């Protein structure tokens, strides 16, 4: 294999790797969803004494599914910048904490 072919293959591989990285906008979307889910939990917790327990349980189960989906999406993000990776990792931890709070508040 010639040197030119090796260099071309390397450039293509680097391009594919970089092309597969997720954009910071993808992280922003997931963070926004997580904030929305935290707000939903706050509202559900605030109103749970005025709502039927079956409704609270059902809403809690749906919210837990959404939080788990967001957490999985966050974990799947491939970010190039270490600072964005740190933000993603913190968001994953917060999603786990939020899921635990949903379970405690609705069961």
Image: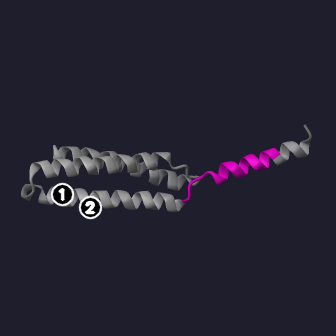
Q: Residue at x 73, y 46 (%)?
A: 13
Furthest residue toward top: 1
Q: What stretch is highlighted in magenta?
A: 9-23
Looking at the picture, does residue 47 appear above or below residue 70? below
Q: Which of 87 and 99 is in front in this view?
A: 99
Q: Which residue is drawn at 10% across and 49% down?
A: 53
User: In this rendering, would 104 be left or right of 85?
Assistant: left
Which residue is identified by label 1? 44
Q: In which quarter of the image is residue 5?
A: top right
Q: Which of 7 and 65 is in front in this view?
A: 65
Q: Which residue is drawn at 78% across and 50% down?
A: 11
Whole-percent x and y of residue 65? 31, 47
Q: Which of marks 2 and 1 is nearer the N terminus?
A: 2
Which mark is drawn over residue 99? Answer: none
Which residue is identified by label 2? 39
Whole-percent x and y of residue 87? 45, 54
Give the crowd class for mark 1: few <14, some 14-19, many >=20 residues within 10 Å: many
Q: What element carries label 2?
A: helix
Q: Is mark 1 on a helix, strand or loop?
A: helix
Magenta part, dominant SS: helix
Q: In which quarter of the image is the C terminus?
A: top left
User: In this rendering, would 8 be left or right of 49?
Assistant: right
The reply to whether the C-beta atoms of the residues labelled 2 and 1 are less than 8 Å apart is no
Q: Does the magenta stretch include residue 22?
A: yes
């Amino acid at each position: 294999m010639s040197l030119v072919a090796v260099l071309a293959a390397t450039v293509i591989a680097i391009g594919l790797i970089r092309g597969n990285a997720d954009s910071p906008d993808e992280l922003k979307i997931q963070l926004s969803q997580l904030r929305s889910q935290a707000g939903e939990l706050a509202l559900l917790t605030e109103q749970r004494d005025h709502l039927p327990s079956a409704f609270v349980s059902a809403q809690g189960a749906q919210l837990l599914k959404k939080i788990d989906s967001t957490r999985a999406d966050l974990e799947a993000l491939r970010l190039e910048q270490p600072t964005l990776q740190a933000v993603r990792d913190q968001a994953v931890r917060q999603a786990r904490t939020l899921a635990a709070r949903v379970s405690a508040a609705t069961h």
